[in-house]
Image: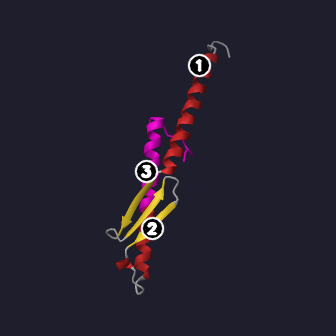
Amino acid sequence: MKGMPPMGGNMNNLLKQAQKLQKQMEDMKEEIEKRTVEASSGGGAVTAIVTGKKEIVDIKIKKEVVDPDDVEMLQDLIIAALNEALTKANDMMEQEMAKVTGGLNVPGLF
């Protein structure tokens, strides 16, 4: 195009920065996926531990909440603990990635 300055050097520099950022994000994501978060429900009756990769690695249930006549309550406690742990894992991923990207919103990042 007429009148536009050549962008060769600037474009190469931009590409290098983008590649560096991508590598940093991949490294951070890998590290976060190894971390775990913990959440509980029912005042600690049920505890769920989830990785940053959003995989359930442990569920702890206190004996006193195991009531054969009220299985629904135990199911609700498990669901609540898991949902909270998954939310914490997602929040951890977003916060750590924001440190790398400087808050830049990158759609489809995780």
Residue at 46% x, 52% y is 90
Which numbered marker is on residue 59? 2
Callout 3: 10 Å neighbours few (<14), some, many (20+)? few
- Segment tinted magenta in the rendering: 84-110
Give the labeled residue for mark 3.
91
Give the residue type at disc 1.
Asn
Which numbered marker is on residue 10? 1
Dots 1, 2 in contact, CB < 8 A: no
Q: Secondary structure at mark 2?
A: strand
Residue at 44% x, 61% y is 49
Which dot, 2 or 3, sits closer to the camera?
2
Give the residue type at disc 3.
Asp
Q: Position of residue 47 (x, y in %)?
A: 40, 66
Confirm whether the magenta stretch covers residue 67: no
Mark 2 vs mark 3: which is more N-terminal? 2
Colouring convention used in this rendered image of the protein: secondary structure
Mark 1 vs mark 3: which is more N-terminal? 1
